[in-house]
Amino acid sequence: MTKLRVTYGLDKVADGAFYHEQHIIDDLKALAVEATPFPKPGIPATDVKGIDTEYAPDGELLTVGFANKGLAAGLEWVNEASRSIAKRALRETKWLVGHNIPGDIDQFASAGLPITEDWYAGRKIIDTFVLAKMLDENKPRGSYGLEQLMLTNYNVQPWKGPTEEKLKNCKCGYTRQEHNSKGKPHCGEFEASGDARDWTPEERESRCKTDAWATFMLAKKFWPAVAHDKQTKLLTETIHRISMTLYRIGLAGAKVDRAYLDNFKATASHEVATHEHELRVCSHRIGWDGDKPFSPTNDDNIRHILFDLLGLKPISTSKGGKPKVDKVSLKVLADGTDGTAARFINTLLAYNKAQKSSSIYGDIDNYIDKDGFMHFWLNQLGARTGRRSSGGGTDGTPSSKNAQNWPPDAKHMIVSRFEGGMIGAFDYQSLEPILAAYLSQDMNLADFFYEGRGYLDICKRVLKKDIEKTSPIYRAIKSMSLGLFYNMQDKLMATNLWNGVMMEGPFKFSEDWNEHLKQTGIYRKQILGLFPGWVRYMERQKLRLQNDQQIVAPDGYVRHLPHHGRGSEGYWKLVNQSINFPVQHLASMVTGCAMIDCEAALLEKYRLSYREWQTSLHLPKNPMYMPHLINEVHDELTWDFPKEHKADMELILDTMSSPPSLTKLIPDLTIKLKIEAKINERW
């Protein structure tokens, strides 16, 4: 009997989400085709091989697997015979195929297996996780696992269940197997241990070879669909090269100043406790009448204080009909009141800020290794917007802290690994508007943001006068201009300005809502009038969405936006994505190409191979005396520089301004980009 596979969320099926209709159809089609036979035992001799590794949580390599369509073998990493076979298999291989392959390549390299410079650099490798995301980025979370993808694309039976079961530990400390063998009753919930040493050697070999076969089979199906011409082959190779460099960013890690961290944690904890005490005292003065003490983390408690006891009028309500008490709403309330109410709200905002800082640092020790480094793992193709995401932990990748929105005081704990070294934040300036100018061929956008003063010039044209960057009207015009890149309309733009969503604090053209809405529309129209090329671009994108149900970026990358027509639910969101996706995707390719090209330029300067460089990243106590790329945050590349860094800084700035890989990928994108470089002892 064939087992039914569900690779989409049941909540999505219940909602009738169009994104998942094709996923349902794919599952049913897979059940209808002839069953795909599992491979026979044996080491394949082909020059394209699927690979897989099984290793323990401490990094010890346990098993390696090799496969093609017809043959597959798993080799326990326990004797010289297995190692000799693995070395011979790799030496006759030209292309490696894997699922989240950078980790497998690193495991092979650490075990002393022969890894070519091409593979280290991201060439002649195929990552089926990357291909699956390129082919269909709309699958729900968990759908990009190797087994799930195989069940959707081939008629095969699941194979991971028995070994996954063995990875589950009871919270008392015994494994499920130990409970069964000792006759002990299960005394708690089971959670994943993640230790492949819980399996027998035969189980590891079987799973490893099947995983290697599965990734080969997926590549056989995905590769022709993704890399189908010269341009898409170049795009796919570039994305794989970025994946390998991202992996090395994760390996490099960032040095943490323990003393700073400990002091900040203590200060944050003290501030949280102080503000919490102040809020409880204040709540009693206001007339708190709850059965339990007031809790500043309980939204219903906050609502009772603000709207029942103090009698304030809610700014807006949630979908459930409750008054909002988020940061923006609280700031608007604080600005509109005084006395006891204002003191309470401002103390609550201070508490929330301290609590957020405390939460950033609260579990941070879990992410710092024995050598004092925190590793930032970045997800290639992690966001549907076209950007990468931070934090790792996606479908088997390493996990880390997400530093994308850390406040400055959190970033300051990162220091150089080098004595006398510095941390460099190299941030692209006005990257999105400049790319929007390229996409729309709007010369005013190019003049304002490349040659001119950006938003200051927009303000001067709209307001007929020069203003300061610190003025509220400047921040309002800047926020409105950014909103246009997302196709924001009058009412939403006016609402966001009114409630302070688009900028720090609310902005009102008038205290009368209708007049504020009217003025917002007037200014929005004036700003749009400055950029006729962008207006035409938006109309083109809307037409492409309607006709093609997808958007193709200039480098050939496809964003799939299926829909049921212009009047269907959620269509306006797809319109916004069709307009903004090319900007976000190109921005990620700018920073991605800058990463791989800076790395290549530095290795050439220091006469290092990729093998030597990646090997050195496993030895943090003896780092190579050269810049280490330690993170990517939005449009910023973060570097750890040795003491003598001037020449390296100039090399990086020159490479980032015009990455060769980007020029090769998009030849007519010839703009020399601007970068602001900030060098300090701390991030």
Image: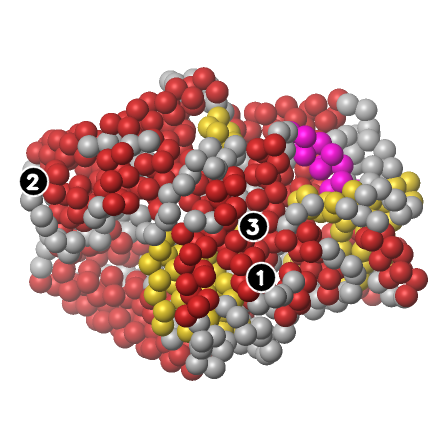
Question: Which amino acid type is marked by label 2?
Answer: Lys
Name which residue lies at 73% across and 62% down.
Answer: 109
Name the amino acid type tagged 3: Ile
The answer to which of 267 and 54 lies nearer the viewer is 54
Q: Nearer the viewer, residue 262 or 65?
A: 65
Amino acid type, label 1: Glu
- Residue occupying the point 17% across, 44% down: 457
Under circle 1, the secondary element is helix
Q: Which residue is mark 1?
A: 604
Where is residue 68 shown, x and y percent of the image?
82, 40
User: Mark 2: which secondary structure?
Assistant: loop
Where is residue 210 drawn, in percent x and y? 81, 45
The answer to whether residue 217 is magenta is: yes
Q: Earlier in the sequence, mark 3 or mark 1?
A: 3
In terms of secondary structure, what is the magenta stretch mainly? Answer: helix
Measured as percent of width and height from the top left, residue 241 is found at: 59, 49
Using a 10 Å C-alpha cutoff, classify the residue at mark 3 as few (fewer than 14 neighbours), some (14 to 19) or many (20 or more): many
Residue 305, quarter of picture? bottom left
Q: Nearer the viewer, mark 3 or mark 1?
A: 1
> Is residue 315 at least partly visible in the picture?
no
Q: Quadrant of the N terminus?
A: top right
Q: Dot 3 corresponds to which residue?
A: 242
Q: Quadrant of residue 229?
A: top right
Q: Position of residue 673 (x, y in %)?
A: 37, 49
Residue at horizontal 89 percent and vertical 47 percent from the top: 43
Q: Is residue 666 left or right of residue 45?
A: left
Distance from label 2 to label 3 (Cα)? 45 Å
* Closer to us: 55 or 170: 55
**Residue beneath label 2, please?**
464
Q: Which residues are magenta?
A: 213-225
